[in-house]
Amino acid sequence: MTHGVEKISAAAARWKSWKMKIDGVPMKKPRPLLALFVAAACFLCGANLTACPYSIRDSAFIGRGSRVPFRLVFLSTSTTPGNDKLAEAVKNAAASWLQDSNVVARVVELDGPEKNEVPTELQESYSDNSLLPAAILFSPSGESLELGQLELKDKPLDTIMELMGPVVESPLRRGLQEKLVKNWCVIVFVPGTDKKQNAEALSGIELAAAAVVGKKTELNKSIDTAPLILTLDPEKAEERIVLWSLGVLPGEGEKERPVRALALAGRGETRGPTLEGENVDAEKMGELLEMLGRSCSCTTSPVWLIGKAIPLTWGVEIRAMATLQLGFDPLDPEVLRSIKGEKKKPKELAGLGGFEEFELGYSEVTIDPIPAEEEATLQAGSEETGETSAPQKNETPPAQEAGAEPQVTTEGSPATVILIALGAMFSVVILTGYVILRKSPQS
């Protein structure tokens, strides 16, 4: 009994001694450096959770430039000869030529309520009924290319078919869709009038294209295929629409013309500036090709995420090929929402390899998906006026339908998982160090 009391007394004494020792230790002052480390861990983890898993090159498969269509407008009036057959002819021709393309066709009567869809200056230019019917192609940004007057007397469908074909097809565009998927990008080389400058520029482009192979993107993916170089002759009439859509159509009476080069990616969209004259060299082209590998995150200027588009078809087979190559479905609306552009100040464009003010200039833009009501209006207009639009591939098809194309989501993509894991590990290390420091009186 006495022995037990002694044990209890000894334990109580040890407890009292330990408590006095703890109480005697002065309270530790807050450690600003540690607080900064913890804050940094939280920031990194949060950044990893929201980092964009796509490159600038990927954004050309997703971008709004291919979702906002070109508009092929046929101008007429209710009294124009052949007007009664025009809408039906446009509808049938569009079903053949514009299926799965980024071009929609529409008849606009200049004496009808829809005339305001055409700029006032063009309404005035075609106010004389003898100039109608006529066709005008509008780009997604609203620029116009007049395609001329139409003869509808004998075979209106044949006339419309003949005009509509070159809008989406040309020698340069045959097989281009597959080339855009398989290669890092397609470099479009537009020769100038100086043959020596052309040769030097082409040599520099070839060097840059070869040098980019094997390099890593900002998302740590290897560039395995070299860019493909295609020459676009500015003198070829069959490429007039491509030249116009890319902003390199020669002006009337132009005698001297500089050499130009640009990068085409995804569904036929430009990324980066159009290099011109002395700027078409290995250094500038190399910088452009490497920039295509940057992440389309908040650190990237939005001018790199939106560019000019060319009229091009994009069918189910090409979509499946792109999905397999990219690892995600580029036409998924959720994918488009993930690359919304961030507004930037001019000073934040530093470090873009000298491209901080290319042809688009400084602007504050946000890449948003097309509102559902806008698409519904577009489709309704097609049905009422004979306009035929490409199927809206950015709408997710019903799941499990017979023969339905499998949907690939970005949830759980390797890049996102790795970033989240790194953020979590960093946080654990910091918190563990904090606990050790708390327990050590000597720290």
Image (spheres, rainbow, N blue to C red):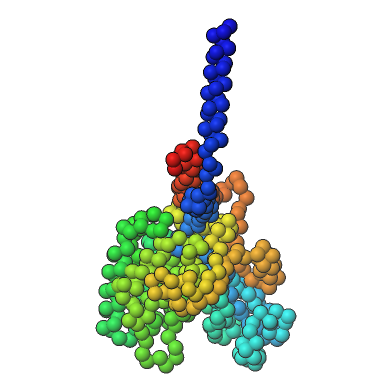
- Left or right of residue 52, residue 222 in this image: left
Say which residue appears at 50% left-offset and 52% top-offset.
Answer: 32
The answer to whether residue 140 is visible is yes
Figure quadrant of residue 278: bottom left
* The N terminus: image quadrant: top right
* The C terminus: image quadrant: top left
Say which residue appears at 54% left-offset and 19% top-offset.
Answer: 11
Q: How many discs appear? A: 0
Residue 212 percent location from the top left of the image: 32, 63
80 versus 183 height, above or below: below
Residue 83 percent location from the top left of the image: 67, 81
Residue 426 percent location from the top left of the image: 46, 46
Say which residue appears at 49% left-offset and 75% top-offset.
Answer: 346
Considering every residue shown, the one lying at the far right of the view is 113
167 versus 295 height, above or below: below
- Left or right of residue 191, residue 441 in this image: right
Considering every residue shown, the one lying at the far top of the view is 1
Residue 396 percent location from the top left of the image: 60, 54
The answer to whether residue 379 is visible is no
Say which residue appears at 31% left-offset and 75% top-offset.
Answer: 281
Q: Nearer the viewer, residue 43 or 38?
A: 38
